[in-house]
Image (cartoon, helix red, strand yellow):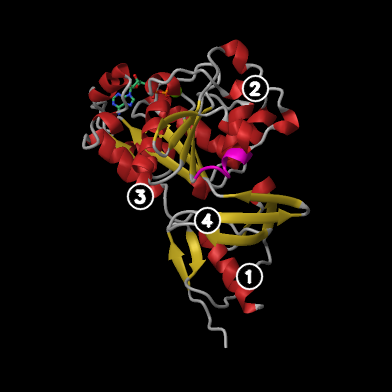
Amino acid sequence: MVPEAPLEDTDCGRAAHGEGWFVLNAREACWRDRGPRGRLCHFEEYPQFLAGVQEVTRVSEEISHWVMDLEGTHAEFDARIITVFAAKGGCGKTTLATNIAIALAAGGARRVGLIDLDLAFGDVAIMLQLVPERSIADAVGLGDQLDETSVRALITPYAPGLDTLLAPAGPAEAERVTQGLVADVLRIARGMFDFLVVDTPPQFTDHVLTALDASHVHVLLTTPDIPALKNLRITLDTFDLLDLPKESRVVVLNRSDAKVGLTASDIERVIRVPIMAHVPSSRDVPVSINRGVPIMVDNPQHPVSKAIRDFALGRLTGPTVGEQSFRGLRALLNRNR
Ligand SMILES: Nc1ncnc2c1ncn2[C@@H]1O[C@H](COP(=O)(O)OP(=O)(O)O)[C@@H](O)[C@H]1O
Ligand SMILES: [Mg+2]
């Protein structure tokens, strides 16, 4: 006899605990295609439920290999894609993206790809003191020939476990990078890494929309000042319009202790979502950037490094919402075996 799997409430919604059967009321289910990520279903208190999944193999504690087949479209991927976004420049996107990538790579414990999608004015190379000899623009024109070998040839390694895909050297080259190329690079790179961290420009460009749609986690950054908060509120509304899942959004307050007259609860009232992580303000951050050594490398015990590392390891690793929901699906499938 297959046992009943009790449902439990988790941070990411309701999930079946263990394997077994359970009953769902899918009467008002609303299905939406999300390309290679399969199909999402919102119903009852379930945030999302995936279909089209053929096989999920756990590669490690945190990473699963997914094989999906959706009406003839075959997709396989491992990497969790994390896009760091803020609609206002200077919030600390590149600072956060680079330091998150270093924290996740943990000296080679994980394979992390850091992609600079701020194509015209990317700062990843300068922040990591890398020479941008290769960039995503070198893949322009490869068309159908773009594969893992050609994506590997675009990579600039930074440290054990951390490879970067840098932005082109100037805006003219950046203009040649199409939305389709970004989608292809992300599709191929997700099979090469455990995590992909995507840094972005402060606008909803087509490239950014492509990355947001492919991402499992959206790290939305703000600083404690009214223009940044206003832009974050507009960003959240835009995410709703774009139908990007609410469960994927993680709001981070950078420079959280800056004495500017706004408390964390004032901020949460304005943006109407909880802040998931606070990164303190410190002059050591610009000092480290000016030296070309990220603070996570320069001083791993610094309060800024610690806040970013705790956030990266505590919030960005572990099962995703999709994987949580998948447990329920697997329980259902097992029942039918
Ligand atoms: N926690 C922090 N404390 C102090 N300065 C910071 C902090 N985070 C970012 N900065 C500074 O803010 C500036 C903008 O950061 P950056 O990461 O380039 O922002 P963005 O990519 O969003 O434009 C940089 O000069 C950086 O030194
Ligand atoms: Mg930047």
Q: CA distance from mark 4 to mark 3?
A: 18 Å
The disc at residue 177 is 2
Residue 64: say if magenta.
no
The disc at residue 64 is 4
Residue drawn at point x = 51 percent, y = 27 percent: 200
The quadrant of the rendered image in which ligand 1 is seen is top left
Q: Secondary structure at mark 1?
A: loop
195 and 4: which is toward the camera: 195
Q: Is mark 3 within 8 Å of ligand 1?
A: no
Q: CA distance from mark 3 to mark 2?
A: 34 Å
Tag 3 and tag 1, C-beta contact below 8 Å: no
Residue 191 higher or lower than 299, as above or below: below
Label 2 vs 4, first from the N-terminus: 4
Three-letter code, disc 3: Gly
The disc at residue 25 is 1
190 and 250: which is toward the camera: 190
Label 1 vs 2, first from the N-terminus: 1
State how many labels appear: 4
- Give the magenta part as a residue range: 187-193
Label 3 vs 1, first from the N-terminus: 1
Label 3 vs 2, first from the N-terminus: 2
Q: Secondary structure at mark 3?
A: helix
Tag 1 and tag 2, C-beta contact below 8 Å: no
Three-letter code, disc 1: Asn
Left/right of residue 79 with respect to residue 316 in the rendered view? right
Q: CA distance from mark 2 to mark 4?
A: 30 Å
Mark nearest the camera among 1 and 4 is 4
Q: CA distance from mark 1 to mark 2?
A: 45 Å
Q: Is mark 4 within 8 Å of ligand 1?
A: no
Query: Which residue is identified by label 3?
Result: 314
The disc at residue 186 is none
Three-letter code, disc 4: Ser
